[in-house]
Image (tube, rainbow, N blue to C red):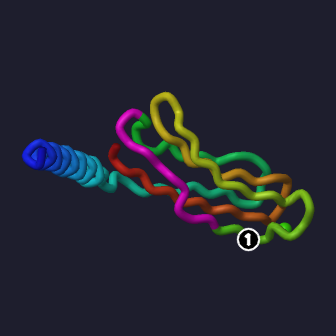
């Protein structure tokens, strides 16, 4: 009976070791790909930057800076979207004569 338990323990350790190795390999596969920015100044609307391929990378927002968004209509927004071909980074301003928005993003290989 002790021998059976011992075998099971060994099998359990083997499974644990393989799982750990698998998870480590996945973690090591993620590597930096590229960095991007988009900005818009003084006028309502959207300015966008096409980033890296959506099939092989993932991107996320890393920085935002706004100035002169000091009245009710002066909204400012950064947006990261996964398109069918590429990721896009968008800098969006509401109605304004002097507001600014700057956005930064990073992309990593899947
Ligand atoms: Ca303003």
Query: Quadrant where the C terminus lies?
Result: top left
Q: Nearer the viewer, residue 11 or 31?
A: 11
Q: Establish if 40 lies above or below 5.
A: below
Location of residue 21 in the rendering, given as x and y in whole percent from the top left corner: 19, 50
Q: Is residue 25 visible in the rendered structure shown here? A: no
Q: Establish if 84 lies above or below 101.
A: above
Pointer 1 residue: 67
Q: Residue at x 57, y 55 (%)?
A: 38
Q: Nearer the viewer, residue 62 or 18?
A: 18
Q: Residue at x 29, y 53 (%)?
A: 27
Q: Magenta segment: does it hold 60?
A: yes
Q: Magenta segment: does it hold 86?
A: no
67 left or right of 95 in image: left
Q: Nearer the viewer, residue 61 or 3?
A: 3
Number of numbered markers: 1
Judged from this view, the residue extending furthest toward the front is 1
Instruction: State whether label 1 is within 8 Å of ligand 1.
Output: no
100 left or right of 70 in image: left
Location of residue 103 in the rendering, given as x and y in whole percent from the top left corner: 59, 59
Q: Is residue 2 visible in the rendered structure shown here? A: yes
Judged from this view, the residue extending furthest toward the top is 84
43 left or right of 47 in image: right
Q: Residues within 10 Å of mark 1 (few under 14, many from 20)?
A: few
Q: Secondary structure at mark 1?
A: strand
Query: Quadrant where the N terminus lies?
Result: top left
Q: In the image, which residues are magenta?
A: 55-64
Please tell me in which quarter of the rendered image ligand 1 is found: bottom right
69 left or right of 77 in image: right
Q: Residue at x 56, y 48 (%)?
A: 89
Q: Residue at x 77, y 64 (%)?
A: 99
Location of residue 70 in the rendering, given as x and y in whole percent from the top left corner: 86, 70
Mainly helix, strand or loop, the magenta region?
strand
């Amino acid at each position: 009976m002790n021998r059976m338990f011992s075998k099971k323990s060994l099998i359990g350790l083997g499974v644990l070791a393989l799982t750990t190795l698998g998870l480590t390999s996945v973690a090591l596969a993620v590597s930096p790909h590229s960095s991007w920015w988009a900005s818009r100044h003084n006028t309502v609307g959207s300015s966008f930057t096409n980033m890296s391929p959506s099939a092989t990378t993932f991107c996320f927002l890393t920085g935002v800076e706004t100035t002169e968004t000091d009245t009710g209509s002066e909204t400012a927004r950064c947006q990261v979207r996964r398109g069918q071909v590429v990721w896009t980074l968008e800098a969006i301003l509401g109605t304004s004569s002097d507001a600014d928005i700057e956005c930064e993003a990073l992309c990593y290989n899947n």
